[in-house]
Image: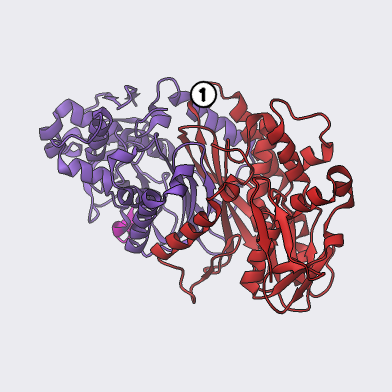
Chain colours: A purple, B red
Amino acid sequence: MNATPSADRTEAGAGAGEFQAIERWLGMMPAPLASGPYRAGDDAVWLKSPGALTISVDTIAEGVHFQRRWCSPQDLGWRSLQAALSDLAACRAQPVGFLLAVSVPANDFQDCSWLDGVIAGIGEAARHWDCPVLGGDTTSSPAGLVLSLTVIGQPLGAPLCRAGAQPGQLLQLSGRCGWAALAVESLLSAEAEPPEQLAARALQAWRRPCARLDLLNSLQTATAAIDISDGLLADAEHLSKASSCALLLDRQALLDPELIAVAGESRAANLTLTGGEDYELLICTSEPLEGFFTVGEVQEGKGVRWLSGERIEAQGIGGWVHGVSG
Amino acid sequence: MNATPSADRTEAGAGAGEFQAIERWLGMMPAPLASGPYRAGDDAVWLKSPGALTISVDTIAEGVHFQRRWCSPQDLGWRSLQAALSDLAACRAQPVGFLLAVSVPANDFQDCSWLDGVIAGIGEAARHWDCPVLGGDTTSSPAGLVLSLTVIGQPLGAPLCRAGAQPGQLLQLSGRCGWAALAVESLLSAEAEPPEQLAARALQAWRRPCARLDLLNSLQTATAAIDISDGLLADAEHLSKASSCALLLDRQALLDPELIAVAGESRAANLTLTGGEDYELLICTSEPLEGFFTVGEVQEGKGVRWLSGERIEAQGIGGWVHGVSG
């Protein structure tokens, strides 16, 4: 067991193997038809027929994505649904509802109080976005709580996905990143209670993220989007690859001066680029969009690098070094 | 940790509490509008607008629903998707695709061979039903493999659900039950390898179930349906309650003479009524339907009992005693 926020990606030795395994597994299964009534491979699948729905699934596991002492059960429930809904936001889809699959340790059925809190937090987020629960499955768990949330949305307009960036466009972001990862770093290093000196902003960022569904209207003219929950650098690379474009990040625009003030410039850069757990949107647009700020530009080519031309080097929480170059 | 096939229901003391907890949780979340474009509360949710899609989620957890020695990884993958698709069959929906959320123990990323087999089995089932993978999520697991499958289907005709039984109708079943539970009973009691004397039919029933999607056309005139994966008696009670009708089971028609020959009459009855893991369909229909056999009738009233008027008493694998009366 490990406890990094994205242990599945950052654990030593497993990162590349896992992505390879996923590629291999996809090859073992029938692929969506290229001309079919769906569009797979983005944050959420877009279903055209008979109308259009957007569906995505997101899993959170105890001991992997969180530990109980990190937050209240309500916070955990809130952030679980917000994280799932973030994928709908990235696809410019209005939530229709969600399905909840929950695997529960035996103890939590004997004393339901903690789990009740989790569900209450999910309900709070669901009410916030007017997103009813439409189904689900409940099972026992061999160890630790596992929540798997399937969210269903109705896309506004044409499908918005990762492929769609065009050279000459602006690269924009919906909010500052790195604060949630700062919280996770501190929570991981604390033996018992979270350290009091940890900035309240960081804890709030991790415990109470909000899917950027408030920006759906602003996204009308965006041509590509992704949520950066896996870490800005990794997700930018997904967008770059899907769009066959180079993405150039403006270091000064990207890094939050307030985060630098708290964590120092080098650590702030690492947290911003690789921390993950930020449910902001990275988009490509020809004109600045309301609610977003510019963090770089789209160019011909491939890969993700600094606007200065430098190679981006960043260290993840688990010690895994990203090195993504053009 | 326990290892019954439906530990979430049968574990001593947890059964009632869990159902109560689900009721309570539902009350904490915004409910679907009664006049909304969906129908929730059945095996799968039916989405009318903008067209119609049927979506369901099903979770299988290691140490809860299976142990690795019980079957090959391919079998496990096969049965995982078939189990999920069974909910679509019960709603008379043709599969459109599925999303796979998988939580994986660290060891299985280091040596992917077992997990590869699981995915291959899922792929085999997916090809069998022409049901492409449309998305998913992969995370680490704190302990044991957890698979959560979201299946999406296109309903044929009007929604078919649990509410819809009418007094005077036939109660029909799509196949014999109890064999899969016989396998689980034997596998649970075996220390190491499954006993050779276990009937091959039982092992096959557990390892290679098939969603009854082959019967979609036959279901055209059915007015209520449910899959009996949670155990025939429990699922019959769900149908009875949703339809506000009594269901009367014909003991002689229901019990498989071949299962009685292998297991004895009393054990065969328990396995058939409470075993679960059978992915057959229980339906209500005015005329006998092709592919189904009659196991009882629908009457005015409530509850589930023998056609003879006797109360049904049955003992589940975990020692949990069902007692369902009118």
Q: Is residue A43 left or right of residue B225?
A: left
Residue in the foreground of this view, choosing between A133 and A22: A133
Which part of the image, by quadrant, shows the C terminus of chain A? Answer: top left
**How many marks overall?**
1
Q: Residue A43: x, y in percent?
A: 43, 46
At 34% from the left edge and 55% from the top edge, which residue is drawn? Answer: A121
Above or below B253: residue B191: above
Residue in the foreground of this view, choosing between B310 and A76: B310
Magenta region's main secondary structure?
helix
Name which quarter of the figure residue A215 lies in. Answer: bottom left
Q: Which amino acid type is shown beneath numbered disc 1?
A: Asn
Q: Is residue A79 left or right of residue B214?
A: left
The residue where tag 1 is placed is: B107
Is residue A65 magenta-colored?
no
At 17% from the left edge and 44% from the top edge, which residue is drawn? Answer: A201
Is residue A216 magenta-colored?
yes
Residue in the foreground of this view, choosing between A190 and B78: A190
Q: Is residue B42 left or right of residue A101?
A: right
At 74% from the left edge and 66% from the top edge, which residue is drawn? Answer: B311
Q: Residue A79: x, y in percent?
A: 33, 49
Task: Read off the magenta span.
Answer: A214-222
Q: Residue B173: x, y in percent?
A: 79, 61
Residue in the foreground of this view, choosing between A146 and B38: A146
